[in-house]
């Protein structure tokens, strides 16, 4: 961290008073992470899932390159599947036989190889029952691996009555089709992410419009690219499977491993308070920058990347935030809006950088090197803390915080633009 004087010289003014770099996989001692329970995970530098205990930071890595993506910050989620890593009696299988696998190749450290029987029928796994409310959205995710002569796998999330969404995974190509809605299911969505040793994490989401009831995740083995699901099985063919998760929400979150019961992962609350905040913050003017990425568009919900507040009200704060990926913005509130500057558009899973500068009657903000927007009327609130990746009590950014920097002066507009590149 570089700590120049508040009365910086012309050459020193470009040096931040506070600088945090989460891509180093190291947490500044002044930053606090609060997250109850030992149920959270990350992808470590070896590309495999690793449990992270309560109140510890989740420095998350790219599973293929081993590069640190920054500090993972997510909302609370619940994995309804009681045995997520290994087959047990809670799974409902049809015309497949479970077999042990070499766990050294599995991204979760567990898994099952399902081989077909010779039945002339569908060959599938039905698992992860979850009670959903009317009009709720549910997401099913799973790791799959080919190499057993069956490369086309169907993933389904439905209500046990044919309503939901489905997609088809091509394990040879590492692709997934867009989700197709089934029955009265709506808003289907699918994703795929590559891991080492030919594994892929795939998700399928749906919104139920039927009355509340049980939802389930299903994995269907197709014979080939024709997507025939009823055929005479071959006992040497099948699919590797691990890491099943079914959760309430429109997108998959990080894996919550279970063995005998459903489990909750609590939200990542990241903050700087007391003198850990006040020692570097300037109450009259300043500039803040944030670099990170998000993996979901939360739509018409205000999501903060950085919120400097009084710890009581979201209306008394300085924010780098978004209102959906189409409206990232810089705002200042002081019991009423003092400035609100839209900065452009974000792209999911792509690193961005936002900068916002404040001083009474002088505000500016820029995104990714764009022309700064300005506002020339407004006051500065009295604040006492900073949240990273969340507003007071949520919502949470559902993404990676990479870097934060703070200058104790209102940088000129050209500097605001330059530091957003």
Image: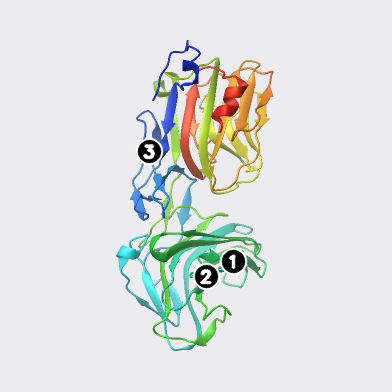
Q: Left or right of 95: which side holds 157?
A: right
Q: In this view, does 354 lie above or below 38?
A: above
Q: How far apart are marks 2 and 3 (CA)?
A: 35 Å
In contact (CB < 8 Å): disc 2 and disc 3:
no
The dot on residue 24 is 3
Residue 85 versus residue 129: which sits nearer the camera? 85
Residue at the (38%, 74%) spot, across then down: 113
Q: Distance between the residues labelled 1 and 3?
A: 36 Å
Q: Is residue 146 above or below residue 361?
A: below
The residue lying furthest to the front in this view is: 11
Q: Can residue 136 be seen in this view?
A: yes
Q: Is residue 392 visible?
A: no
User: Who comes first in sequence, dot 2 or dot 3?
Assistant: 3
Residue at the (47%, 31%) spot, across then down: 404
Residue 48 versus residue 95: which sits nearer the camera? 48
Which residue matches tag 2?
170
User: Who comes first in sequence, dot 1 or dot 2?
Assistant: 2
In contact (CB < 8 Å): disc 1 and disc 3:
no
Which residue matches tag 1?
177
Q: Is residue 13 above or below residue 86?
A: above
Rendered location of residue 7, percent (x, y):
47, 10
SS at mark 2? strand
Residue at the (61%, 23%) spot, across then down: 414
Q: Residues within 10 Å of mark 3 (few under 14, many from 20)?
A: some
Residue 114 versus residue 128: which sits nearer the camera? 114
């Amino acid at each position: 961290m570089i700590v120049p004087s508040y009365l910086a010289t012309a050459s020193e003014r470009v040096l931040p008073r506070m600088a945090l770099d989460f891509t180093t996989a190291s947490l500044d001692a002044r930053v606090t992470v609060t997250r109850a329970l030992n149920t959270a995970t990350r992808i470590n530098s070896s590309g495999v899932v690793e449990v992270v205990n309560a109140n510890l930071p989740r420095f998350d890595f790219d599973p293929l390159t081993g590069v640190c993506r920054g500090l993972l910050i997510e909302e609370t989620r619940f994995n309804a599947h009681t045995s997520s890593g290994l087959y047990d009696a809670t799974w409902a299988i049809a015309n497949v036989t479970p077999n042990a696998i070499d766990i050294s190749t599995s991204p979760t450290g567990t898994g099952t190889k399902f081989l077909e029987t010779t039945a002339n029928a569908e060959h599938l796994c039905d698992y992860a029952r979850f009670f959903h409310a009317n009009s709720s959205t549910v997401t099913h995710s799973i790791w799959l691996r080919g190499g057993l002569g069956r490369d086309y796998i169907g993933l389904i999330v439905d209500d046990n009555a044919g309503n939901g969404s489905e997609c088809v995974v091509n394990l040879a190509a590492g692709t997934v089709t867009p989700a197709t809605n089934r029955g009265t299911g709506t808003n289907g969505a699918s994703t795929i992410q590559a891991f080492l040793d030919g594994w892929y994490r795939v998700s399928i989401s749906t919104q139920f419009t039927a009355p509340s009831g049980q939802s389930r995740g299903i994995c269907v083995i197709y014979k080939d690219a024709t997507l025939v699901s009823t055929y005479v099985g071959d006992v040497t063919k099948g699919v590797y499977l691990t890491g099943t998760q079914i959760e309430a929400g429109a997108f998959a979150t990080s894996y919550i491993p279970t063995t005998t019961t459903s489990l909750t992962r609590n939200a990542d609350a990241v903050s700087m308070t007391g003198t850990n905040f006040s020692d570097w913050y300037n109450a009259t003017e300043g500039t803040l920058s944030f670099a990170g990425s998000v993996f979901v568009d939360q739509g018409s919900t205000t999501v903060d990347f950085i919120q400097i507040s009084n710890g009581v009200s979201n209306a008394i704060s300085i924010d780098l935030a978004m209102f959906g990926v189409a409206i990232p913005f810089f705002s200042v509130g002081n019991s009423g809006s003092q400035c609100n500057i839209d900065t452009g558009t974000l792209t999911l899973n792509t690193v961005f950088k936002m900068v916002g500068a404040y001083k009474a009657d002088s505000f500016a903000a820029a995104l990714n090197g764009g022309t700064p927007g300005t506002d020339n009327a407004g006051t500065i609130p009295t604040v006492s803390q900073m949240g990273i990746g969340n507003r007071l009590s949520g919502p949470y950014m559902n993404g990676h915080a990479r870097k934060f920097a703070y200058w104790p002066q209102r940088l000129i507009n050209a500097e605001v633009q330059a530091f957003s590149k």
